[in-house]
Image (tube, grey):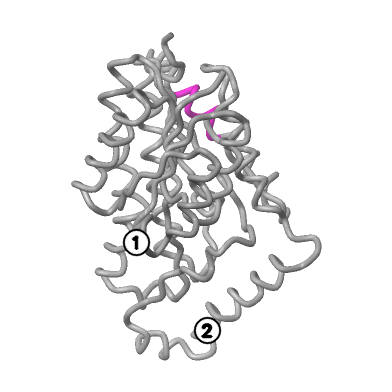
């Protein structure tokens, strides 16, 4: 059955692939992005030609989010699914990122998600149905060096999505996570670097670690055995197609060998959560109420 799906960050990477995939599968897609008539006009025109509704949304701006969601509702009547995909990465020694660097990153990866959820949830709660998909990362489950603020933002997103899961279940709304590993998108081309570069110099040879790490990742992503980012778009489609109440809370998508340990970690976390909620008589909050 066709659903109305709003996707943030649709001009590149997983967002663009997901919008194209969902359009091909017969869904109605509201593809949102910054500057669809200028900087991202090429991508907005591509999606528009395939039938997408193009809406301008900057997830760091309250008024842009509120207006964008209103415009989307005016265009399609209701929204069944919100895919919180917009995000940005970092590369650098954690100490070298200033407080303003952290604020800028969290404004997109965390506060931007909260803005979108707050704008759309009154509509979903009124309809007593809906699906929030939060595009997280395997780095929201374990850390790698030189991604410090990004790791923290994805850990925060994981907690946000988990809390929404239990607080929204009584309204028939699901909150789930998709956790991609490393894929060859334009992610590394758009990463934020620390403003206090001088601080990194006191780390000696380790100061070269971030650049060396990115170079190694890009080499892996460009190889003939590199994982295809379409895997993530397909996973998002599969989650949407799954029967309400049967959707997994976390979906791992990986092609570099990190996925299986994270799946085991997630299974252990689910078992722990179920045990605690059962002990406190709150187990019903882990299941959506139809």
Give x and y (percent) for residue 83.
45, 38
Looking at this rendering, what residue extends furthest in the right direction?
224
Give x and y (percent) for residue 80.
42, 25
Looking at this rendering, what residue extends furthest in the left direction?
63
Alpha carbon distance from label 1 to label 2:
23 Å
Q: Is residue 31 above or below residue 211?
A: above
- Camera-side residue: 11 or 47? 47
Q: Pointer 2: residues within 10 angstroms few (<14), some, or many (20+)?
A: few
Residue at image coords 46%, 16%: 287
Give x and y (percent) for residue 228.
70, 53
| Displayed quadrant of residue 172 | top left
Q: Secondary structure at mark 2?
A: helix
Q: Pointer 1: residues within 10 angstroms few (<14), some, or many (20+)?
A: many
Disc 1 and disc 2 in contact, CB within 8 angstroms: no
Residue at image coords 34%, 73%: 97
| Displayed quadrant of residue 283 | top left
Give x and y (percent) for residue 31.
44, 43
Q: Is residue 180 above or below residue 94?
A: above
Q: Quadrant of the N terminus?
A: top right
Looking at the rendered image, the disc whose residue lies closer to the viewer, 1 or 2, is: 1
Is 131 magenta? The answer is no
Of mark 1 and mark 2, the one earlier in the sequence is: 1
Q: Quadrant of the C terminus?
A: top left
In this rendering, position of residue 127 left or right of residue 191: left
Q: Label 2 belongs to which residue? A: 206
Q: Label 1 belongs to which residue? A: 105
Please give the range of residues in magenta. Answer: 269-276
- Camera-side residue: 168 or 209? 168
Residue at image coords 26%, 44%: 65
- How many numbered discs, if any? 2
**Does residue 141 show up?**
no
Q: Secondary structure at mark 1?
A: helix
């Amino acid at each position: 059955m066709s659903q109305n799906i709003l996707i943030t960050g649709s001009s590149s990477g997983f967002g663009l692939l997901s919008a194209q995939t969902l359009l091909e599968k017969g869904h109605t897609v509201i593809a949102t992005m910054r500057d669809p008539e200028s900087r991202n006009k090429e991508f907005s025109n591509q999606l528009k030609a395939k039938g997408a509704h193009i809406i301008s949304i900057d997830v760091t701006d309250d008024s842009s989010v509120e207006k964008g969601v209103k415009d989307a509702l005016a265009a399609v009547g209701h929204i069944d699914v919100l895919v919180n995909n917009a995000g940005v990465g970092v590369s650098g020694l954690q100490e070298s990122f200033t407080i303003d660097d952290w604020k800028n990153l969290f404004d997109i990866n965390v506060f931007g998600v909260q803005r979108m959820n707050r704008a759309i949830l009154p509509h979903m709660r009124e309809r007593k149905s809906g699906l929030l998909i939060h595009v997280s990362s395997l780095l929201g489950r374990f850390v790698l060096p030189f991604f410090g603020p990004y790791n923290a933002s994805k850990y925060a997103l994981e907690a946000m999505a988990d809390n929404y899961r239990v607080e929204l279940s009584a309204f028939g709304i699901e909150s789930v996570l998709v956790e991609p590993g490393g894929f060859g998108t334009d992610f590394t081309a758009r990463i934020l670097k620390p403003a206090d570069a001088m601080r990194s110099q006191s780390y000696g040879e380790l100061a070269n670690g971030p650049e060396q790490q990115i170079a190694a990742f890009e080499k892996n992503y460009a190889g003939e055995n590199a994982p295809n980012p379409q895997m993530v778009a397909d996973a998002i489609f599969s989650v949407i197609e799954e029967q309400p109440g049967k959707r997994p809370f976390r979906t791992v998508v990986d092609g570099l060998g990190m996925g299986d340990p994270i799946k085991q970690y997630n299974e252990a976390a689910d078992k722990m959560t179920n045990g605690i909620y059962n002990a406190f008589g709150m187990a019903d909050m882990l299941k959506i109420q139809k």
